[in-house]
Structures are given as structure tokens and as C-alpha cells.
Amino acid sequence: MTKPVVAIVGRPNVGKSTIFNRIVGERISIVEDIPGVTRDRIYSSAEWLTHEFNIIDTGGIEISDAPFMEQIRHQAEIAIDEADVIIFLVNGREGVTSADEEVAKILYKTKKPVVLAVNKIDNPDMKEMIYDFYALGFGEPYPISGSHGLGLGDLLDEAAKFFPSDEGDQYGENVIKFSLIGRPNVGKSSLFNALIGEDRVIVSDIEGTTRDAIDSVFTFDEQEYVVIDTAGMRKKGKVYESTEKYSVLRALRAIERSDVVLVVLNGEEGIREQDKRIAGYAHESGRAVIIVVNKWDAVEKDEKTMKLFEQNIREHFQFLSYAPVVFLSAKTKKRVHTLMPMIDMASENHSLRVQSSILNEVIMDAIATNPTPTDKGKRLRVYYATQVAVKPPTFVVFVNEPELMHFSYQRFLENRIREAFGFEGTPIRIISRSRN
């Protein structure tokens, strides 16, 4: 099941970015005391008690004829439409403003639960300032302080009451789910059609034609699949039609639902910086990844072209060193048949478990070849390793002092594990823990 989505909405300069950063736990949004400084929706994952959720920081909503404010209003409306729960943030020090009332009018139209949060209530003596906000019609206001981190627990407790219940995966365990992500106009929809064998998706040369994520179930060689087509992701910060921003969140949610993610590149255009950002979403999610170079039919090539292109990919996508590369043409369907076996392989490796006894033999052989490092006279000692999870395969290595496990030695152990067990197409994670 995908994570619930919480959207923080409100007029400019009420502290949305500060609250967002407090909940996420790191400074992701720009925080500046200038109205409207948040120019784009920012997405991140967060956790409260036993709840994991995605959170959106929107630009402020302001009813204005200015194109900039109109764009911000559209962004917030889209976030409202996508959210499971809405946190309506107001500024307690300024009281109810006409702009707050305009935001409230937009929120009245949604059937989503709304939790009213009154920010900048920095001490208990200021709590009497929240009462005016009952007039907005959203029930009990929750006093909070973004700058001091006060009241956020009560706010999140209330928001979590409205999270959808976990209904589990709607598809069977043996069904392989994969999604297609990439910049607009790299040919995802054409590849989608080529895979499912029907023209369910509109295919055109206009960037951003696909507006939503679409599921299709199909069977290939007696294996059942669900393929999720997503709208293309554009470069952050670029001013474009607001529905494109909506599609970014949809793509992230599609990744969450996938076992395997196909990062689609345009072979005709080459690698762009945005390709790396998009691929980073899949890598960070821990999903299996395949890099698909589409439109290969349109590339002028000789016997070295494919090898040089793959070298270029490896140079730019060093964090995806485990991902296989497939060259194909969705338009002519040339080499499309090579993709399905690759998806099967990546999905199988993503779920692969290895026996602890064999794993420890590999680890001890690796240590014998390359002894553990020392730091200030202390040597790292590795006692035991075991696999604790799949999707992605996750290993815990018990050591004397976890801080002695330098990232370079961890990378060495990862490489030896890959040499022994494969794991092509999937990231693997290694966690160091004290034996005690």
C-alpha cells in the first residue's frame, strides 16, 4: 500500500516550510521571511510513531490576479486534491485574515479531512490567541510553534486519525509490479503500449500528454505483471502547467507500489541532469532498477555506439552501478522482447534470500583477503552477518564498534556479496550494529 499523503496549505508566510522541515527532520524547504518564497511543492517522507507518510509543502494560496500567485494557488489546489489529510496552517499572531478566509473557501470544497493548525504560538500564555480561528469552521484549532517545535505531536496525532487503513496489496504476491519513470517525451507511453500490446495510452510528441498513473495487468509467459505508467517529471523550479507538478507526486507514489522501476532515457537526446534526479527517486526508494534507453532506432550508430553510451551511463549514474541497461525502440518494438526477462531477473534478485552460513563464509573470505580497517589503534571486528529483509535485500553485520565500519569497507563487503550472490538489478543495504 502507498503511504498516506499529508499536504500543508495556507496563505504565504504562515510558516509552512518551517513546519514541513520540523516534521521531516531536516531543512529541505527554503525558509525565509518573505511571503511566497516557497515557489514549488516540496515532497518528502516522514514518520510519526508507527505511521509512515508523504508530506507536501505547498506554496501559499493567495487569490490574486498576479500570475505568480495564481500558480501557487493552483499548486496548492492540486496538493489538496492529492492529499489524504490537509493541515491548514494559519498565523496566530496576525489573527484571521481575509486571505485565510479565501483559503478556507477552497478547503470547503474538498471532502478531505482538514486539521487546523495555528502557528507561532510560542508559549502557553499565547494560547488565547487561537480562539478567533474557530470562526474558520474547521473545528478545534491546534496551537503549535514551528520555530520551537511545540505542539507538533498533538497535531500529527490528529492527522494520523484520518490516515487510510492498510488494506494490503491489491494484487497477489506472485504478481510483478513495475513502473516507468522519466522525463517527458522519452517514450514511456509508447513503451507501455508496446509491452501490453494495445493502444490504451495516448501517444504524442507533446511533452506531458500523460496526466496520471495508469495500471494495466497482463500476462507474459505465464507470469502475471502490473505495469504502472506515469506522467513525465519535469525539471524542478521550471514554470509549467500545474498538472505536471501533480504528476511528480503520482510518479513517486507509483515507485512506492513497484517491485521494479524502469528509468527510461531518450537515446536520441542523450543523458540530461534531470534524468539523474529522476533515477535518484527509484534508488532512494530501494526498488529494483533497470535503465531503459528508448528511441535507439533514431540514433546514428556503429559497432561502438552502444558500448560508449553505456559507459556514459555508468559515469553519470554511478549510484546505479547494479542496474542493467537495455537498449530498445518502443516505436519499432525492436529489442522490446529483451525487457521482460530482465524485469523477471531484477524482481527475483530484489526478493532473494541467502543462507546465513553461506553469507558468513563470503564475509570471512572477504576479510581474509582485505583485513578490516583500524582507527586510532582500534580494529574493526566483524562477528556475524545475517539477512534481515528483502525488497531490497538488507543485511545486518554485527561488529565490535559500528563507527569503525568506514563506508569504503562497507562498499567492499557489498561488492563481495554481489560477486557471490549476484543481486543484479537491485540495491542492497548493509547495516552495522554492535553485537551487544
Image (cartoon, rainbow, N blue to C red):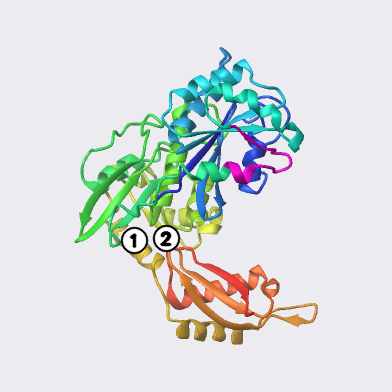
> On the image, numbered disc 1 is attached to which residue?
342
Q: Which residues are magenta?
A: 141-155
Position of 50 with respect to 213 (left or right) is right
- Residue at the far top: name it: 65
Residue 198 point in image, percent of width and height: 21, 42
Q: Which residue occupies the foreground of this view, 253 or 194?
A: 253
Report the amino acid beneath label 2: Pro
**Quadrant into which the C terminus falls:** bottom right
Residue 82 position by quadrant: top left
Q: Which residue occupies the foreground of this view, 13 or 195?
A: 13
- Please tell me which residue is depicted at 58% across the width and 27% down the height of the picture: 10
Magenta-colored stretch includes residue 152: yes
Q: Which residue occupies the foreground of this view, 378 or 191?
A: 378
Q: Is residue 300 above or below residue 13?
A: below
- Please tell me which residue is depicted at 52% across the width and 24% down the height of the picture: 137
Pointers 2 and 1 in contact (C-beta within 8 Å): yes
Q: Is residue 378 above or below residue 178?
A: below
Residue 404 point in image, percent of width and height: 70, 74
Report the amino acid beneath label 1: Met
Magenta-colored stretch includes residue 195: no
Q: What number is the disc on residue 324?
A: 2
Question: CA–CA distance between discs 2 and 1?
Answer: 8 Å
Principal SS element in the magenta part?
loop
